[in-house]
Image: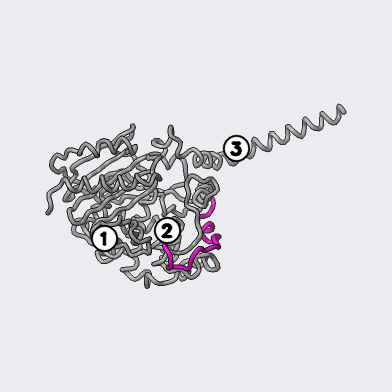
Amino acid sequence: MRKFFRTARWIVLILAVIIMGLGIWKRDDITRLLAVNSLFDEDRIVHNFSHMDDLFFHTTMARGDGPVSPLPLGPDFTLPPAVTEWITDRNVTGLVILHDGQLVHESYYLGTAPEDRRISWSVAKSFLSSLTGILIDDGTIASIDDPVTKYAPALIGSAYDGATIRNVLQMSSGVTFNEDYFDFWSDINKMGRVLALGGSMDGFAAGLKDRFADPGSQWQYVSIDTHVIGMVLAGATGRNVADLMQQYLVAPMGLEVDPIYLTDGYGVPFVLGGLNLPTRDYARFGQLLAQRGNWQGQQIVPSNWIAEATLPSARTPAGQIGYGYQWWIPAGWPSGEFLAQGVYGQFIYVNQNDNVVVAVNSADRAFEDPSVDEENYAIFQLIASQFPAP
């Protein structure tokens, strides 16, 4: 019996050493996994959203050697009382308002600072839409109706086999994907764990096998569709999407700081939500769209692409919010008024008709309440209504 206990103690000791060794070896992976599980905790969410590069794999895009594009100060603008209340209710961390390209309001909250590079979440999708339009316009991609497998052959045999670029831009791939952020076993959360543990986002997308509808026949918001757009752009050019974004959008726009893209363990950008910028730079992108792709005399994004991308062309349910090519168009909004939107309250509202841009970053844990979006949209239109019609 004594021999048994001596042997057992040695086994326990050896297992403890092995576990300790694995902990050291996989320390970074464990840290990232824990970060995913606590990312949205009430006491951490604000700090996390401004320090995502401390938590995940990432790459930095150079802003370029050119000067920072100016945001000239406009006339004093007083926020309506309803907007002030909304800022508190929605846990807004940054708010920038432009009118006629001039900075008329800028404010930061909850201990954040102007230079913080804040996570975009799905606002990043709208950046990728513009990059797609550039590469279609210059002929790198032959047609928006090409199958995605033409440029991303890894998707042959997956649920994306048979879907076109237009289908994935419109969130109409028909691919089965559970987007519930509050379900630990949902596809969106499984994807987050792949990202944290250094797995392959390309492999994750290629591993999806099920469809709930034929491509193009039905709209359903499926974030992994945006990753497939990234696979198409990378396949069409033979280049990393971060390099493409840097060349075609970041450097020409004269952003203030080097943007950060979260990546998987293979350096592939998390294009569906991993862009990190200061709120002012999100506003610059919104102003680019307000000016129909023209920036300081240079046509960066084709104007016809912007017009097409921001039409509610997807087959969303009648009477509900419309969707274009990775842009949202709430029901009843006129042509020329649209927005980029991300979870937890990230927005770029663009009103081409009144030349108003509102960039918002938030840590709104109540973002899935059905009434919240309606409140947000009403606030943006209230802000725009404060400026005289052109």
Up-down relation of residue 5 to residue 48 (above or below): above
What mark, if any, has residue 24 been given in the picture?
Answer: 3
Amino acid identity at mark 3? Ile
Residue displayed at 24% across by 64% down: 303
Please, what secondary structure does the residue beneath circle 3 have?
Answer: helix
Amino acid identity at mark 1? Ile
Residue 371, position as x, y percentages in the image = 35, 45
Callout 3 touching callout 1 (CB < 8 Å): no
Residue 204, position as x, y percentages in the image = 53, 56
Ranked by sequence position, the earlier of labels 3 and 1 is 3
Residue 127, position as x, y percentages in the image = 34, 55
Magenta segment boundaries in residue numbering? 199-220
Please, what secondary structure does the residue beneath circle 2 have?
Answer: helix
Please, what secondary structure does the residue beneath circle 1 have?
Answer: loop
Q: Looking at the rendering, in which quadrant would you find the C terminus?
A: bottom left
Question: Badge 2 local density, few (<14 within 10 Å), some, or many (20+)?
Answer: many
Ranked by sequence position, the earlier of labels 2 and 3 is 3
Give the left or right position of residue 47, taking residue 283 as reference.
right
Q: CA distance from mark 1 to mark 2?
A: 21 Å
Number of marks? 3
- Residue 15 drawn in magenta: no
Which marked residue is nearer to the observer: mark 1 or mark 2? Answer: 2
Nearest the camera: 317 or 158? Answer: 317
What mark, if any, has residue 300 been given in the picture?
Answer: 1
Callout 2 touching callout 3 (CB < 8 Å): no
